[in-house]
Structures are given as C-alpha cells and as structure tokens.
Image: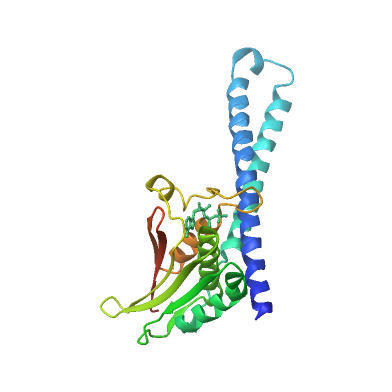
Amino acid sequence: QSDMLMQANKMIALSKMAAGVAHEVNNPLASIAENAGWMKDLLQEEELAASPNFQEFSTAIDKIEHHVVRARKVIQNLLGFARRMEPAKEKININNLLDETTGFLDNEARYVNIKIEKAYADDVPVITSDLSQIQQVVLNLLNNAIDAIGKDGIITVGSRYLAKSGQVELWVADTGKGMSEAELSKIFDPFFTTKAIGKGTGLGLSISYSIIEKLGGTIRVQSAVGKGTTFTITLPKN
Ligand code: ADP
C-alpha cells in the first residue's frame, strides 16, 4: 500500500514539476521570439539594411528564431510526458479504486479527526479507463478536502451509475470552509492557489481537469462558503 502511495505521489510531483517548468520557460521564450521578430523588422529599415554587418545580424536573428522553435518542442514533449501520450485502457472497479485511494489517507485523516464516509452504489459497472490517472485525480481531491477542513470534519466519497447515459459518477464531498464564486471561477487555472508558499502549487486541479477531459469525462464543483464543497466526476463506461 505505501509503495502505491509513493508511486502515485511521485507521479503527481513529476507532473506538477513538468507543468511548472513548461510554464516558467514558455514565457521567456515568447518574449525572445517577440524581440527577435522586432529586430528583424528593424533590420529592414534603410540605414541598417545598408550596414556592412547586415548579413551577420540577419543570420544571427534567424538562428535565434530557429532555436526558440526547438526549445518549444522540448517543452511540448515535457508536457506530453506529464499528461502521458495514451491513457491506459484497463478494467476498473470504481468502488475498489475509491477504497484503495481513501486508504492511502486514512492515517492522515484520523490524525486531524476527519472521518471518511462511503456512499457507494452497488450497481456501478466495471469501466474501461486509466486506473493510475483516476487515482491521481481522486488523491488530489482528497488532499484538497483535508486541507479545506483542517481539523474535525467529514469527507464523503461516493459512486453512482447513470444508467441512461451509461456513465459512472464519483464524488468527493467535504465539510470544509467552502469557496466563494470568485474563487470557484479560478480553481481550475494553473497556479491558482490560496495555500501558503511551499504548501500549494495551484496545479492539482488544472492537471486533474486535463486528465479527466482526456479520459472523456467531466469534472464539476459545487460549494458553499462555511459549509463545504463537492467535486463530481463523470466517466464514460468505455
Ligand atoms: P493547491 O491545492 O496546490 O492549492 P489546486 O489546484 O488543487 O492547488 O487547488 C487550487 C485552490 O482551489 C486551492 O488552493 C483552494 O483555494 C481551492 N480548493 C480546492 N479544493 C478545495 C476544497 N475542497 N475546498 C475549498 N477550497 C478548495
């Protein structure tokens, strides 16, 4: 069990780091590209075009542009790794997945007097999806729920089968501090965090969002300040 947790946490840490590096490097690259373009325009002006160094300048700027394109490709690959090319297609019992993932945090929750309750439907069919990616998302939601409660509260994890649409729903509800409309509108943005430096990266929910999107599902949230928050994920059966 602790091996699995370590593996899951390692994946989260790696994805966050990759996304963070990509973001930090993309901005300066954009600025370099913009300035190179501007220098190119300048070179077209008469005085500079007549300069004996015109050719050398022009070649240097072309090189800058060429290498910016190369660096951008490296970043794309890094992000591709973070989001993994193709999601796995394995048979998943959602209730088992929820049991296992909450199990990772049992001790931590007990320590701050948070009770984890389960509301599983027993008609939830086996789905075909990517186990470790769904686990990564649920772990993110549970960690956020623990942070939102702080001390003394209840986290409920549940599942439901939407027979009409053939989809499976799972949710994580907490009795934590909740969020205002203004906060809610930003939580899926990369780097949005209300947590202390070193505690939050603001990447958990943005990565979760892109994972669920890639798996063909949806993620939505309901929250009330002072009452709590519920994240609901819908996944296709196949
Ligand atoms: P991080 O946890 O690193 O801050 P996330 O992307 O996971 O990054 O979350 C972004 C922000 O959304 C959090 O800092 C917090 O303000 C808010 N948030 C997320 N989940 C909850 C929750 N269950 N209850 C209240 N606020 C939440």
Q: Residue at x 42, y 52 (%)?
A: 179
Give the number of marks. Answer: 0
Position of 168 compared to 86: left or right?
left
Looking at this view, is 51 or 25 the one in front?
A: 25
Left or right: residue 20 versus residue 219 is right
Q: Residue at x 59, y 26 (%)?
A: 38
How is the rendered protein coloured?
A: rainbow
Q: Position of residue 80 (x, y in %)?
A: 58, 60
Q: Kindly identify the residue that appears in the image at 47 percent across and 69 percent down.
A: 154
Quick one: quadrant of the C terminus? bottom left
Residue 31 image point, x, y percent: 61, 34
- In the picture, which quadrant includes the N terminus? bottom right
Q: Is residue 86 visible?
A: no
Q: Is residue 197 left or right of residue 53?
A: left
Question: Where on the picture, by quarter, is residue 224?
Answer: bottom left
Residue at screen point 40% across, 81% down: 120
Between 151 and 10, the one lying in front of the other is 151
Work out which residue is located at the far left of the displayed protein and give it: 164
Q: Where 141 falls versus 75 (above or below)?
A: below
Where does the image place residue 209, in percent across and percent down from the top left?
47, 60
Looking at the image, can residue 183 be seen? yes
Q: What is the x, y in percent for residue 192?
A: 52, 48
Q: Please, is residue 230 above or below residue 162 in the view?
A: above
